[in-house]
């Protein structure tokens, strides 16, 4: 019996080794072998996942600074799963959380993202001045916040050797990495950003032309504009708009502080179609007007309700609010 248990344990260790695409090793005066406190574990897992998500958005050319959840394709292909803690030292082993639905699962995408994140972290630690995407830089800064000289002095982001990734990569996260990330984040940072929302107000003073856009998610954003856009902005007041321009980011965050609008356009919305509600328009016409397409992948609906939210309670709150 003991031999069978030992063999089962060895097989499990071997299987974990095959599945492992990322190891996070933590060392420090407050770390005991094979153990990690729950608060540190929760924070490490959360921040590591955020780094992976942001790196995936960078590789896919998506915006890393945006309201709302991460794109479903990234969640599906890059969600980490804690599969083991090595007893010889405190090393967290992560694999990819495979979907429970019969969908295509691309392990290669997740492996590439984790490896690229290691290169980015190592570049920052080496003092390389190469540009790092603002959203990704913020996520690395937050991950490095776990480092505390009294408890955790170092974190190693390790990408082990695999068939499709023959070279082991190690990126060390120390207090120096956090300081370098902070130095970059504290400097004025500007990006080209897109803001969608309701254009609530505008001030047309010659020396201080400004307006406010209320996004559907998040706080309002103050914007400035030039004289050439005065008439356009006046016409779009109280309407859903999409503004594109140079955005100033708040220090140490990926939140937009202000945007200088370079172009602004009207956006279709349910509010714009309110007059059609009583016109008895066919569903096909309404969907075309609102640019709604049929679902081609049922997994698109996944993640709409948080896992810790009770469905009955959720529906009860909705029906209660309608009374």
Image (cartoon, rainbow, N blue to C red):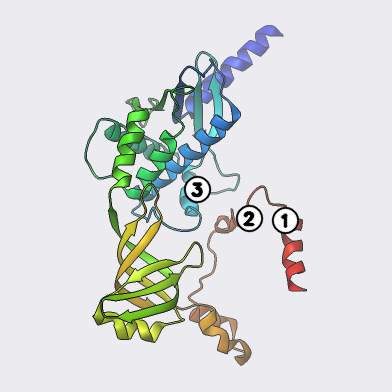
Query: Relative to 141, does residue 210 appear above or below in the rendering?
Result: below
Q: Give residue 129's quadrant in the image.
A: top left
CB of mark 2 within 8 Å of CB of mark 1?
yes
CA distance separating discs 3 and 2:
14 Å
Q: Residue at x 30, y 36 (%)?
A: 180
Tag 1 residue: 311
CB of mark 3 within 8 Å of CB of mark 2?
no
- Say whether residue 118 is left or right of residue 10: left
Q: Kindly give the residue lying farthest to the bottom in the view shown.
A: 279
**Residue 252 spot, x, y in % from top left:** 38, 46
Query: Relative to 100, does residue 235 appear above or below in the rendering?
Result: below
Q: Earlier in the sequence, mark 2 or mark 1?
A: 2
**Residue 272 spot, x, y in % from top left:** 51, 83
Q: Nearer the viewer, mark 1 or mark 3?
A: 1
Assign the C terminus to one quadrant of the image: bottom right
Q: Earlier in the sequence, mark 1 or mark 3?
A: 3
Tag 2 residue: 305
**Residue 201 spot, x, y in % from top left:** 43, 78
Q: Which mark is residue 75?
A: 3
Q: Earlier in the sequence, mark 3 or mark 2?
A: 3
Q: Nearer the viewer, mark 3 or mark 2?
A: 2
């Amino acid at each position: 019996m003991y031999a069978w248990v030992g063999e089962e344990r060895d097989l499990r260790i071997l299987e974990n080794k095959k599945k492992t695409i990322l190891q996070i090793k933590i060392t420090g005066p407050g770390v005991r072998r094979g153990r990690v406190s729950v608060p540190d574990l929760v924070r490490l897992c959360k921040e590591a996942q955020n780094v992976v998500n942001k790196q995936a958005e960078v590789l896919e050319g998506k915006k890393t600074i945006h309201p709302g959840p991460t794109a479903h394709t990234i969640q599906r292909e890059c969600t980490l799963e804690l599969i083991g803690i090595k007893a010889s030292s405190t090393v967290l082993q992560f694999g990819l959380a495979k979907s429970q639905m019969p969908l295509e699962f691309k392990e290669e995408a997740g492996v590439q993202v984790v490896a690229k994140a290691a290169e980015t972290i190592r570049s920052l630690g080496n003092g390389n001045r190469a540009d790092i995407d603002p959203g990704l830089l913020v996520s690395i800064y937050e991950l490095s916040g776990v480092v505390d000289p009294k408890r955790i002095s170092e974190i190693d982001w390790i990408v082990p050797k695999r068939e499709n990734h023959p070279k082991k990569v190690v990126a060390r996260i120390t207090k120096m990495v956090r300081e370098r990330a902070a130095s970059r984040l504290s400097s004025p940072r500007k990006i080209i950003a897109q803001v969608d929302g309701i254009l609530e107000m505008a001030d047309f003073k010659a020396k201080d032309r400004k307006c406010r856009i209320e996004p559907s998610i998040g706080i309002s954003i103050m914007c400035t504009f030039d004289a050439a856009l005065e008439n356009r902005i006046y016409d779009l007041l109280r309407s859903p708009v999409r503004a594109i321009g140079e955005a100033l980011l708040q220090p140490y965050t990926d939140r937009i502080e202000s945007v200088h609008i370079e172009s602004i356009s009207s956006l279709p919305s349910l509010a714009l179609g309110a007059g059609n509600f009583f016109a008895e328009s066919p569903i096909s016409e309404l969907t075309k007007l609102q640019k709604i397409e049929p679902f081609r992948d049922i997994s698109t609906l996944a993640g709409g309700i948080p896992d810790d939210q009770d469905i009955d309670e959720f529906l009860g709150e909705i029906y209660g609010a309608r009374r």
